[in-house]
Amino acid sequence: MSSENPAEARPALGQVMAGCTVLVTAERRASELAAALERRGATVRHAPALSMIPHVDDQTLLDATRSILDNPPDTLVVTTGIGFRAWLEAADAHGLEGRLTGMLDGIRIVARGPKARGAIQAAGLQADWVAESETSAEIAEVLLSEGVAGQRIAIQHHGAGADGLDEVFEKAGAQVAGLVVYRWGPAPDPAAVTASADAAAVGDIDAIAFTSAPGAEAWLRAVDEAGVLSAVKEHVDAGRLLMTAVGPVTAKPLEDRGIKTLQPERGRLGALVRAMVGHYEQIESVALATVAGPLQIRARVAVLDGKVLPLSPTGVEVLRLLASAGGDVVSRDQVLAALPGASTDPHAAEVAIARLRDTAGKNLIRTVVKRGYRIELA
C-alpha cells in the first residue's frame, strides 16, 4: 500500500463529509469536535494554534477571589464559559466554591454570549442579562447606559487578558476587580501549525474550524509568517476551502483580512458541526451527476456515489481535471499536464486514465477518438 495515498486505508463511507479533510485549530474540546466530524465521514487534522494555561494555583487569582467574597460586587461580568468554569474549579481546589456560588446567587450576573450563559446555568446560577452579540462593547454600552458610578463590578476576563472593560467602567466611576482565570499560551507544536498553513495553501485541506478569536488570530499569524495568505484566500474565494467559526467574535480576525466564514446561528460546537454538514449537503445536492452516481472532488480524495475512491494524489488531480470540464472533452495534453514530471508521451495519459477506470468503473470515463477523454454524465 502506497504511503502517498491517504484514501487507500479509508473504508468506503456514505456520510456527507466523506473524504473531507478538516483542520481543527483548538486545543480545548478538540477531541469532542473531531469525533463529531469523524462520525460524518471527515478526516480530522489537529494543529492547535494556542495552548491554554490555567491559573488554578495562581495566588493572584486566589487573592482576588477572596477579596470578592469579602466585599461582594454589585455585578459580575462573565466573558467566557471556559473561564467561568475554570474559576469555579480553582475556587473548589481551595475549598471556596460553596462560598463563591452562594455569593454569586445574590448578585447580578452579566454574560458575554450564550456560551458564558451556559456555564453559568451549569453551575446552578442564572444570568440576568446576556450580550447576544458576544461582544464586550455591547456589555459596556448597556451597563454605561444604566449608570455604573459608585458600583462594584467584577470582570472575569478571557485568555487574552483585559479587553478594555476595566478602564471604561473605572472612568465612569465604578470600582472594578479583574479576574484572569487562564492565559493563552504558545502553540503546543508550532511546526504542526506552520505545516497546516502550508497544507491549506496548497489545497490539501477542505475546511478549517475555529472556536476562538485568539486561536484564529494565532493561526493567521502562522499563515502570514509562511507567506501564504494570498494562496489561502484564493482557495477560500474559489470555494475549495471552507472557513468556519463558532460565532462572529471568533470570525472577526478572519473577516478583517477579507476571508469569508461560515457561522452557525448559535455559538455552540454542535451547531458548528451542523452548519458544516449543511454546507456539504448543499454541495452534495449539486455534485456532478455521472452515469456512476454523484461525483465530488475533495482536497485529497474523490467521492463517487457516496464512496471514497482509493486514488493516488495524481489520480485525484486527473479526475478533478475531468470533472471541472463538466462533461466536455479534455485533451491528452491537458491530462499530461496534470501528471507529475514533464512527460509528453501520450501513453502516460492513457495509463493514468486506465487506472482511473480500474478504480472508478469502466463506464465513468469515455475516450473520444483523436480528441481526448470526458466524463459520462447521467
Image: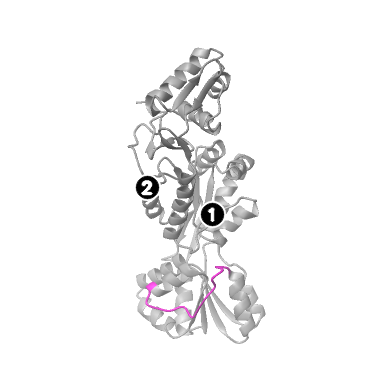
Vertical relation: 239 (above or below) 182 = above
Q: Residue 223: where, in percent of width, then height?
A: 59, 44
Residue 262, labelled with which disc? 1
Q: Which quadrant of the rendered structure holds the C terminus?
A: top left
In the rendered image of this protein, does residue 6 appear above or below residue 90?
Answer: above
- Give residue 38's mark: 2
In terms of secondary structure, where does tag 2 sit?
helix
Label 1 sits on a secondary structure element that is loop
Between 77 and 330, which is closer to the camera in this rendering? Answer: 330
Residue type pointed to by label 1: Leu
Q: Magenta includes 323? A: no
Q: Residue at x 62, y 54 (%)?
A: 255
Asked if one can make out residue 180 in the rendered structure from this viewpoint, the answer is yes
- Amino acid beneath label 2: Glu
Magenta span contains residue 127: yes
Q: Which residues are magenta?
A: 122-135
Where is residue 244 drawn, in percent x and y?
52, 53
Q: Residues within 10 Å of mark 2 (few under 14, many from 20)?
A: some
Q: Position of residue 256 (x, y in %)?
A: 64, 55
* Precedes in sequence: disc 2 or disc 1: 2
Main SS type for the magenta part?
A: loop
Figure label count: 2
Viewer-proximal residue, 47 or 378? 378
Q: Nearer the viewer, residue 283 or 231?
A: 283
